[in-house]
Amino acid sequence: MKNEKNTTDFKALFLGSKSENLNLFKELINNSYEDAAGWRKNFHSQDREIITSFDKKTKEFIDTQSKMEEVLNNLSSLLRGGSIPWHSPRYLGHMNSETLMPGIIAYFEAMFYNGNNVAYESSPATSKMESEVGIDFCRMLGYDPKKAWGHICADGSIANYEGLWYARNFKSLPYAIKKAFPNLVKGKTDWELNNMSVDDILKLLENNEDKWDAIKSHSVRHDSENINKLGKVFVPKTKHYSWLKAADILGIGTNNVIPIDVDKNFRMDITKLESEIQKCIDSKTPIMAVISVVGTTEEGMFDHVDKVIEIRKKIAKQNAWFYYHIDAAYGGYTRSIFLDEQNNFIPFKDLKDKYEEYGIFQNKINWPSQDVYNTFAAMGESDSITIDPHKMGYSPYSAGGIAIRDIRMRNAISYFATYVFDTKINIPDLLGAYILEGSKAGATAAAVWTNHQVVPLNISGHGKLIGHSIEGAFNFYNHLIETKKYKINEVIVNVHLLTNPDFNMVDFVFNIEGNTSLIKMNELNQKIYEETSFVEGDTYINTVLLSHTNFSNEEYGEAPLDLLNRSKVEAKDFEKEGVNILRSSILSPWLYDKDISKYFNDIFDKSIQEKLMEIIK
């Protein structure tokens, strides 16, 4: 294969499923420890030592040290016996995998310094790193890094809360302006106030920065009088459960979160979304926000971001507007595979040549579709985006993130505590004033920052890692298509795949040939899951590990009926039972290789054959 570019070799950046890079890892970890220990020694080196040689010889010291060693040995035993082997390609379950070695080492080293990124004075080094990571997010996700802003948070749920927090507050600001400074919105009706865009509001206040505090004192954050005027939040039925939590926490009410049906490919049905939006406009019902998912957690599918943008432009002619947030916790880093080394979005017609030039795929992969490409091309037109470094960023837990299109948007949610934030001091960023969290680990910022420094967030670096994951998923998907069935004595068990994946999630079911009962098919897949899932106390019992989920009629509507039809089971019990799905998120950086993939697919087949033999017997 043609590959003229000197791209990242990820075999040098992971510890390895068999700790193949252990010596390098130990050397780098030891260097980190030595540097941190030296930092302590060299801070006013003239100071006397507090723990003396005499202290170390006392019975109490020795007994305490022995107790610590005993507990740590026990900890090691518990971790080894009760942890999930994410690092192995045998693990085909949740969204977790190998983490990049530079991030692990950076986290370890930064823990010695115990930075708290809530305030710059308690973490100057890691606060600066977090600011730079925020710029990385913005650039990668399609925002102008000179105008946008982003930061790390605990996880995607916290980022989603922040996204809806922005939507709620911005929707309430025009009413607050009317109360505080009525001349600024003189003559506007309630409908016009409710449909002012983020840009409209920011433009209105760009020469009135001193008015923000007075306006916020009349907004929904202080006065809940107008919260019922803010409108509906539309989410796909594939939404993450955090959106209902967010509506609860922010006082919006879960009854105002309106789920939109998904199509047979498990993407939000754009026709139904547009219909619901038009109903709201016709009845003068405000719309607070629309949420798209780029990387659904159950199916790995990408909603049509470009088409939601088209709807927003279309309804502007009716003087209507909604805040637009993208939940790309899972899929956000995928945008790196579309960026060239200058971080420009690559034209669709050039993608295949670029992928060959950079060795993104080892074999011919029919990816991406035009739909997927259009989604990632349009992301920069949204208002805010959730992204999780601890998923496709291959960083240690817990590392979520959010990016906003315009840094001035922060004013709508800001809080300043004088004991933490001194606004008179010129520092790089008053991070904690603009986020939902308080204290937060500087070690997380160090880990993500280091990964981004080592692995460029474009086709030459992280894009190649994303390509490995996608190709690994396609290898597994194609293997299941080719296998199709397992023969257990005289019984034939067929494999049915949910959908052609947008990303690296492969969902499937098993059904005994001739069975038309959904209940029996569900029982079979539940038993397979139980036989291939984590067994507490011993992670070595199962040769492969799978995950599972259930698609209910309430959550998914009619979308799963296509799978039931192909599985040749009757749908009469679907409304009551849902359908049990086996779910594999292929984050492994190793399964892109055909030989390695075949080795582990053979292990999968042998394991499934054995489990089916036991279950059917």
Image: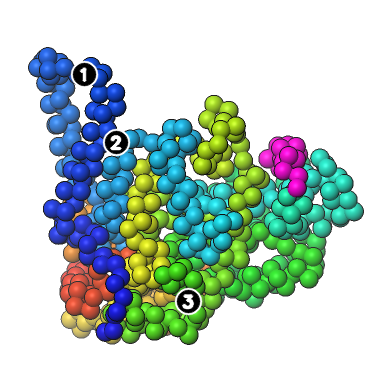
Q: Quadrant of the C terminus?
A: bottom left
Residue 86 in sight from this viewpoint: no
Callouts 1 and 2 close, C-beta under 8 Å: no
Q: CA distance from mark 2 to mark 3?
A: 41 Å
Question: How far separated are the C-alphas under marks 1 and 2?
Answer: 19 Å
Query: Which residue is at 34% across, 80% downward?
Result: 357
Mark carried by residue 346: 3
Q: For numbered disc 2, what is the local secondary structure?
A: helix
Circle 2 sits on which residue?
112
Which residue sits at x=28%, y=43%? 108
Where residue 96 sits: x, y (%)?
33, 58
Indicate the secondary structure of the residue bearing disc 1.
Answer: loop
Q: Is residue 260 above or below residue 398?
A: below
Image-based side of 437 in relation to 320, left or right: left
Sequence-first disc among 2 and 3: 2
Q: Which mark is residue 49?
A: 1
**CA neighbours of label 1 inside 10 A, class few (<14), some (14 to 19), many (20+):** few
Which amino acid, by three-letter code, is at mark 1? Glu
Distance between the alpha carbons at the discs numbered 3 and 1: 59 Å
Residue 239 lies left or right of residue 223; in this view the side is: left
Residue 481 as seen in the image, left or right of residue 90: right
* Residue in the foreground of this view, choosing between 82 and 367: 367
Q: Which residues are magenta?
A: 207-222
Rendered view: 289 above or below 300: above
